[in-house]
Image: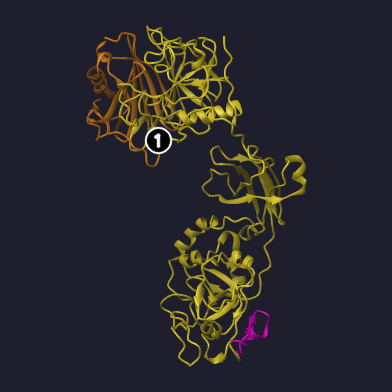
Chain colours: A yellow, B orange
């Protein structure tokens, strides 16, 4: 007898997919896992996928016994596409071996159970002496084939759970015995090809890792709370305990629900309470309740964690959770029409994170401001200053901090560089607000709540309140000659008003007064397209908050 | 549903959303026929061109561990057929031509053949 070699997480127990035993043909280099979540098809390990023909004792292999310890040792070898004369559309040569040969832990027949690779229906059994094939078929039509077995205990049409026993690994091959092994195929209907034998090797590798606890353990974590204060929890990859992994939050639907909104957040927050239990501290995650879900209704959130993406995401303990949050107070200001889905996207505004739904009367009560420009323009002066400005309505508005820029999704890495005289010649508007805030009534129109930009000697009542401002024009030169006045301007684009004609510092092309009066009457992509974009934008801000 | 003319149908197994699986016998030969209406989509999956004509359409004939196997798409439905033979010299088992003739003789039951299925005859 011999002792099966031990596999470890440190040393790969398998040769790469497509790396056949030298001289045994050209394999298919394919890391696709065609049967994700599959259960390894032999009940207990170890097991040794390798060649029966080019291994020790094989027809084309070194002399010796098929029971040689060399055949019962790691590493595994792929033998899908191993040289055969059989037609195989997915093999590089067009011919080859259709599946993977797997030796059980010992060279004994009728001892080692095969088990169902997935929950499935039995669609073929060996019920006559000449038979040696057993098939099970899953709900999606994937078929897993088990050849050369004996002693089957399942019947045609029987439903089997993943991991339930099917038959015993043996050497049945019609009238002529073969070596003791399981020949395992995965047969799928593949678009453009019809039914094909797909490569089973990486599905076997991943399922074997699960069976033997090798290499990849699923993430762990807990969903601590979903309250109006925060949505928080923690997640960790046991295989890389110091690394941060992602938590996946699905609002108002499970991951498979097409109507959910998913958010990916990095679980990298330091939490003292995790240090002792996990041996590593920075695995917390926390986000605010999205504004669109602060509507007085109950919402459900499911929390999952994902490590390197090779395995399925794992639902965290205590998931799902529910929360109900009252609508937030609406900030003062004017409402600026977000005129099209393109504008919404260009400004990286998220109806999921940034938008509150209000009664129509509440929306109507908010004074109308200038429609939002087509896209934000971030500018820096060429005098060495690091100050960043947003050009809006022909004004320069200070971006107070990198955090605020990030909250608005502004691209501050590559600002436009303007001549300092031109930039500082613009009248200064209000600082950019700390975060975007949008509102919407029952109609399709979406509005950004923003400051009213008061012109000098502006008589608007808004200029008497905190929400309006004349800005700081101390460095802007003659205010009468600088950019747009009240309610004008359309932001960026080639259809703007061009440079000032009043003798003040010139505006770069496209950033002057516009023809419109700020009614927000720009042609839009249509309400339907605006709404269609909402779901997409739910994912837009995959940010760590 | 396609069935082999003159063979004994052992069992027809409906498959949740995918189609059906049919097992039929003729002596010690067994035919397992599975249909699928759900295709898996993989990007960039190169494949050699089909080498055979089955029931008037392009398909693949091969042998898997001594079991003859065929696949083709007919009327928008993908089929796979496996033939296990106790007697390798039986007409359907001895050659691709014999296997193809068996498949050519599959007939539709339970409904008319799709109009695009040149090989179907009920």
Indicate the quadrant containing the C terminus of chain A: top left, top right, bottom left or bottom right. Answer: bottom right
Q: Which residues are magenta?
A: A458-475
Residue A45 lies, with reference to residue A128, above or below; the image says: below
Figure label count:
1
Residue in the foreground of this view, choosing between A358 and A419 = A419
Tell me if residue A459 is in the magenta stretch.
yes
Where is residue A472, by image quadrant? bottom right
Spot occupied by residue A204 in the image (x, y as percentages of width and height): 50, 27
Inspect this view and state whether residue A253 appears: yes
Spot occupied by residue A61 in the image (x, y as percentages of width and height): 40, 15
- Identify the residue shown where x is 25% and y is 29%: B51
Q: Residues within 10 Å of mark 1 (few under 14, many from 20)?
A: many
Helix, strand or loop status at disc 1: loop
- Identify the residue shown where x is 57% and y is 90%: A477
Where is residue B29, by image quadrant? top left
Say left or right for A28 vs A416: left
* Residue under pointer 1: B38
Residue B36 lies, with reference to residue A421, above or below; the image says: above
Say left or right for A231 vs A429: right
């Amino acid at each position: 007898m011999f002792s099966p070699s031990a596999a470890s997480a440190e040393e790969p127990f398998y040769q790469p997919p497509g790396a056949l035993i030298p001289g045994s043909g050209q394999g298919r280099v394919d890391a696709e896992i065609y049967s994700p979540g599959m259960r390894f098809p032999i009940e207990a390990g170890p097991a040794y996928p390798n060649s029966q023909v080019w291994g020790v004792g094989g027809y084309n292999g070194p002399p010796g016994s098929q029971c040689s310890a060399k055949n019962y040792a790691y590493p595994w070898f792929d033998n899908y596409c191993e040289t055969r004369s059989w037609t195989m559309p997915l093999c590089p040569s067009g011919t080859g071996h259709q599946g993977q040969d797997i030796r059980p832990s010992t060279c004994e027949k009728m001892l080692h159970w095969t088990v169902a690779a997935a929950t499935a229906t039995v669609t073929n059994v060996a019920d006559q002496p000449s038979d040696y094939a057993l098939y099970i078929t899953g709900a999606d039509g994937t078929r897993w084939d088990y050849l050369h077995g004996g002693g089957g205990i399942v019947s045609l049409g029987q439903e089997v759970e993943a991991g339930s026993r099917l038959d015993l690994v043996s050497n049945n091959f019609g009238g002529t015995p073969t070596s003791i092994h399981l020949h395992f195929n995965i047969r799928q209907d593949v678009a453009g090809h019809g039914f094909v034998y797909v490569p089973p090797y990486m599905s076997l590798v991943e399922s074997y890792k699960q069976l033997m606890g090798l290499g990849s353990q699923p993430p762990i974590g807990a969903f601590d709370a979903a309250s109006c204060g925060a949505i928080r929890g923690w997640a960790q990859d046991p295989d890389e305990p110091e690394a941060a992994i992602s938590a996946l939050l699905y609002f108002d639907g499970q991951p498979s629900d097409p109507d959910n909104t998913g958010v990916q957040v990095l679980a990298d927050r330091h939490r003292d309470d995790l240090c002792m239990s996990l041996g590593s501290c920075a695995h917390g995650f926390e986000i605010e309740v999205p504004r669109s879900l602060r509507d007085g209704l109950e919402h459900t959130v499911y929390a999952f964690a994902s490590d390197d993406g090779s395995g399925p995401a794992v639902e965290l303990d205590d998931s799902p959770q529910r929360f109900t949050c009252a609508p937030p107070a609406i900030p003062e200001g004017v409402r600026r029409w977000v005129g099209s889905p393109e504008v919404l996207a260009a400004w990286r505004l998220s109806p999921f994170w940034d938008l509150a739904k209000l009664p129509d009367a509440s929306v109507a009560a908010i004074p109308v401001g200038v429609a939002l420009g087509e896209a934000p323009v971030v500018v820096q002066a060429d005098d060495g200053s690091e100050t960043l400005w947003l050009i809006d309505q022909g004004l320069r508005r200070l971006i107070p901090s990198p955090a605020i820029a990030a909250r608005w999704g502004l691209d501050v890495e590559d600002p436009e560089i303007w001549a300092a005289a031109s930039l500082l010649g613009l009248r200064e508007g209000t600082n950019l607000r700390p975060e975007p805030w949008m509102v919407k009534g029952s109609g399709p129109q979406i509005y950004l709540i923003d400051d009213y930009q008061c012109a000098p000697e502006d008589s608007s009542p808004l200029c008497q309140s905190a929400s309006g401002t004349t800005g700081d024009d101390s460095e802007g030169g003659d205010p009468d000659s600088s950019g747009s006045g009240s309610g004008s301007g359309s932001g960026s684009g080639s259809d703007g008003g061009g440079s000032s004609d009043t003798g003040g510092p010139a505006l770069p092309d496209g950033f002057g007064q516009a023809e419109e009066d700020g009614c927000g009457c720009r042609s839009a992509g249509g309400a339907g397209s605006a709404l269609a974009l909402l779901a997409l934008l739910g994912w837009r801000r995959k940010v760590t908050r | 549903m396609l069935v082999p003319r003159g063979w004994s149908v052992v069992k027809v197994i409906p498959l949740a959303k995918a189609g059906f699986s049919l097992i039929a016998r003729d002596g010690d030969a067994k035919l397992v026929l599975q249909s699928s209406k759900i295709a898996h989509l993989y990007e960039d999956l190169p494949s050699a061109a089909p080498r055979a004509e089955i029931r008037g359409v392009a398909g693949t004939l091969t042998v898997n561990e001594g079991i003859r196997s065929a696949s083709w798409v007919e009327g928008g439905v993908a089929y796979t057929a496996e033939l296990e033979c106790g007697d390798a010299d039986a007409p359907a088992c001895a050659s691709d031509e014999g296997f193809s003739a068996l498949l050519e003789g599959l007939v539709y039951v339970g409904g008319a053949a799709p109009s695009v299925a040149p090989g179907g005859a009920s």
